[in-house]
Amino acid sequence: MNFAEKILAAHCGKRKVAPGEFINVRSDLILSNDITAPIAIREFKRIGVKKVFDPKKIVMVADHFVPNKDITSAEQTKIMRDFAYEYGIIYYDVGQMGIEHCLLPEKGLVVPGDVVIGADSHTCTYGALGAFATGMGSTDIAAAMATGDIWMKVPQTIKFVYHGKLPKWVGGKDLILYTIGQIGVDGALYAAMEFTGKAIDQLPMDGRFTMANMAIEAGGKAGLFHVDKKTLDYVKEHATRPHKVYEPDKNAEYAQVYEWDISKMEPQVSLPHLPSNAKPVSKVGNIIIDQAVIGSCTNGRLSDLRTAAEILKGKKVHPKVRCIVIPGTQQIYLDAMKEGLLEIFIKAGAVVSTPTCGPCLGGYMGILAGGERCISTTNRNFVGRMGSPKSEVYLAGPAVAAASAIKGKITSPEKI
Amino acid sequence: MFKGEAYKYGANVDTDAIIPARYLNISEPALLAEHCMEDIDIDFVKRVKKGDIITATTNFGCGSSREHAPLAIKASGISCVIAKSFARIFFRNSIDIGLPLLESDDAPDGIKAGDTVEVDLEKGTIKNVTTGKQFTAKPYPEFMSELVKAGGLIEYTKRRVVTR
């Protein structure tokens, strides 16, 4: 069995599972947020059980439109908050919250070998920890909150091998944008993606979270990384719960294997309106921008902010650009403050926001007008994703976003 | 059995296009339906009638996990969606809430916008009444048929918790 199959077999009480098989999977953690929880709660109440199956394995995070942007979003969050307190589940509200996929690993709620399901498509982020994590809808989460398990079809696995040494400004975001560019937005539809190779070994945990996070952008069900010393160090620092390390068998089967040498890769940019429209930054052309967003569950971690700060230090954001920096969690915010990163951003003319998903999905805190363009470290550049259906989002890593903010047009970090 | 007018879309219709996130501060299906498809087809909501059908090519419903997307489509009056392929989470969500999806390689190419289409879910047949052409949808796996027959995931789960 491969990596994904091993974790799934262990969570459905079978010695062996195979792609295409329908199984009932026990979940170690069940997640929802201020957008998806209200529907999950409505459906949960229809089931008619009095309790959730285990309040310690259910977590809700207020992060999408929080601190609430308007009355209707406040009403939605209130439904979640009231439920969380009534049923005694794990809950993070303003003051403790962060963007869920930055927050849960930091709080030690996910460890290697877990199965995690979440009513959020970017739940696949936790694959960076060697867990099988996948996004679902609210009704799935409602059923799982009642029973602790959920149906799944065992996915095929596609293996990705990245050879070579990571160039200076190339990180997890560039590798995953390149990958989606190569295979397309449905190139891994229904499949688990397994990321391996020498370049992956060099990639810090934050870069692995970024890659796993965007597995869904290729249609993937999960994005998995093998557990190594970096993973175990991370787990030791953040978690207390026991973990289990799974390894694929030597004769493990894969639906497909892709291999790339990334030694000469340039930072990547995905042009509107699909994450698969990836190009090397030098081939993007003259694209004037109005806004730069550095943050999100994809790139709102401390090393992302360090990269952006390295470029913005002592420089000024272009007068015609709004640069919005959003640390992923309260802890990241605090660490960035202690390291002096926030001072660098503010002196450069950027704004620093409290943790929120905010502009990534066109919620608030940086909505685009018609005809405007944004370079963004977020994960989707669909039509209308960050505001007006006539606006444009260009996806990139923090280095390109920071460099572009300074120059007022999409720029390689090499040129700063 | 469903019969209605076809609305035709291409590849990778994402859930932001089906229901933009600016409306995710509501969760009532009828209110969501008022904005269904508005960023890619402003006339959809004005024209759609009960029973009408959406056709699309590949990867329909990609992107966010928002269940608001199939809820909005269903509440708009659309009876079913026919596509060459569906994004994974959208597929789950639709089955869970009882929005029928039909996967077919040839039907989406054989149906034009405005054609009248008739769908027999039991038999998995899709008939373009306008042209007379008939197509077959791929059958659901056995487990999914059970879910559909139970009336969606909540009804299915109700039975499971009762028999425990």
Image (tube, coloured by chain):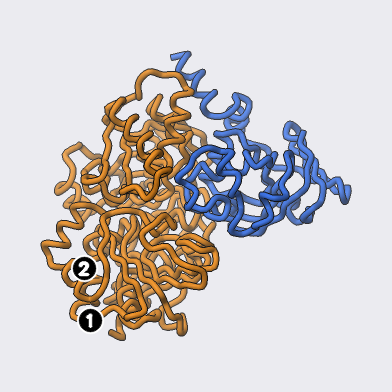
Marker count (numbered)? 2
Name the spot of residue A329 as percent of width and height, x first.
24, 52
Image quarter for residue A8? top left
Q: Using the image as rendered, state which of residue A291 and residue B126 is in the foreground.
A: A291
Determine crowd level at label 2: few under 14, some 14-19, many 20+ residues with C-alpha closer than 10 A.
Answer: some
Chain ID for blue: B
Q: For mark 2, what is the residue?
A: A306
For the C terminus of chain A, the quadrant is bottom left
- In which image quadrant can residue A132 be found? top left
Which residue is at a point 73% across and 50% down the rendered structure image?
A: B47
State the SS at label 1.
Answer: loop
In the rendered image, is residue A13 in sight? no
Residue B108 position in % (x across, y down): 73, 53
Q: Nearer the viewer, mark 1 or mark 2?
A: 1
Q: Tell me the amino acid under the disc marked 1.
A: Lys
Residue placed furthest toward the top? B163
Crowding at dot 1, Cα within 10 Å, few <14 / some 14-19 / many 20+, comes out as some
User: Residue at 43% across / 14% down in the picture?
Assistant: B164
Chain holding disc 2: A
Instruction: Specify whether residue B2 is in view.
Output: yes
Question: What x and y, as percent, mark residue A82?
Answer: 33, 30
Query: What's the residue at 47%, 40% (across, down)?
Result: A137
Question: Same chain for marks 1 and 2?
Answer: yes
Chain painted orange: A
Secondary-structure class at tag 2: helix
Residue type at numbered disc 2: Arg
Q: Quadrant of the N terminus of chain A?
A: top left
- Rendering coords of residue A292 (x, y %): 36, 71
Which labelled disc corresponds to residue A315? Answer: 1
- Could you give the CA–CA distance between mark 1 and mark 2, rounded to whole angstroms? 15 Å
Disc on the earlier residue, 1 or 2: 2
Quick check: B141 above or below A370? Answer: above
